[in-house]
Amino acid sequence: MRAILVVNPQATSTTPGGRDVLAHALASQVKLDVVETDYRGHAMAVARAAARDGIDLVVAHGGDGTVNEVVNGLLSDSGGSPDEAGAVPTLGVVPGGSANVFARALGLPADPVEATHRLLTALETDRRRRVGLGRADRHWFTFNAGLGWDADVVGRVAKRRGKQTTAGLYLRAAVRSYFRPPLGRPTLTVRIPGEEPAEVVTAFVSNTDPWSYLGERAVHLNSGCSFDTGLGLFALSGLSLPTVCTHVRQALLTDSDQHGRRLMRRDDLPLVRIDAAQPVHFQVDGDLVGQRTRVEFQSVPDALTVIA
């Protein structure tokens, strides 16, 4: 088996020593090349080349941004449909970031050493699974995407964070973005096939649950969402303090079942389009993509094979 280990040395919990241990362990089972990323988009380029060269396995060691780049590289020739991409390398993940939402949703240990052991065991026993992904504006996403408030938060965090990203940083960014939204609060129109359009002010789209993590606390928006279902939509038509406090409290409950007068929630959606009255921030998997006035979100079942 030919494999490539893609390491982001700037990720929160990656270290040269950890990289060497992981590479040595993998090299005992596969023919391995190791690539350290040194610019934004590098992991995507490596994964795209790996798919075109017929590599069997690509292991991403970094945070959710690194995993997202690798996934987009692996599926870059798919045209939105994995069936059109031909044979795509299997994905392996060893978490090295701060949140590691995708890895945790797969049930992988947060500790890189434990995750490496799990990966090696899975390779020995050929344990793998197919996972569904989301696609938005030609970008694949593994766990969430959004327009409005959450994307504003992601943008603020990206400007201020260094190697270490903390829950406190996200909380401060959320409060600032709530009181001083950088692009205002333009109306968003949600369009779901078979339903009347609905107006909201912020929209979160999930590909799995939890939507994210606040430190060790899981954040639940669409608790029935998983890699085996369609997309989850969580959208609010108002952002008054009582509304926000209600849904933040519900989101942090272990058995969360989000509901409320201002909430538009849908589970297992194959397709949803969101139009904005003026440009708003757009994020996928915790990375700011840019500004958009229209994004179509699509669920793609069985998009990728993952060692788990």
Image (tube, rainbow, N blue to C red):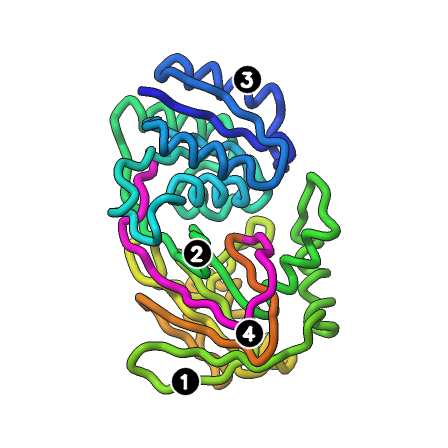
The amino acid marked with disc number 1 is Pro
Secondary structure type for disc 4: strand
Q: CA distance from mark 4 to mark 2?
A: 21 Å
Q: CA distance from mark 1 to mark 4?
A: 15 Å
**Main secondary-structure element of the magenta-colored stretch:** strand
Q: Dividing the picture into quarters, in which one does residue 267 lie? A: bottom left
- Identify the residue under disc 3: 20
Question: Range of the magenta residues?
Answer: 286-307
> In the rendered image, which residue does mark 2 sit on?
138
Out of 98 and 34, give the one closest to the viewer: 34
CB of mark 3 within 8 Å of CB of mark 4?
no
- What is the distance, in whole Å, between disc 1 and disc 2 at their CAs? 23 Å
3 or 4: tag closer to the N-terminus: 3
Depth-wise, is mark 3 or mark 2 nearer the camera?
2
Q: State the image coordinates of residue 197 (x, y, percent, origin top left).
A: 41, 85
Q: Earlier in the sequence, mark 1 or mark 4?
A: 1
Instruction: Tell which of 212 and 81 is nearer to you.
Output: 81
Q: Which mark is residue 197?
A: 1
Asked where in the image residue 289 lies, by quadrant, the reply is: bottom right
User: In terms of secondary structure, where does tag 3 sit?
Assistant: helix
Contact between labelled residues 2 and 3, with CB atoms less than 8 Å apart? no
3D distance between C-alphas at marks 3 and 1? 53 Å
Q: Nearer the viewer, mark 1 or mark 2?
A: 2
Q: Position of residue 212 (x, y in %)?
A: 51, 55
How many numbered marks appear? 4
Mark closest to the chain's N terminus, 3 or 1 = 3
Task: Check disc 1 and report its element: helix, strand or loop.
Answer: loop
**Disc 4 residue type?**
Thr
Mark seen at residue 60: none
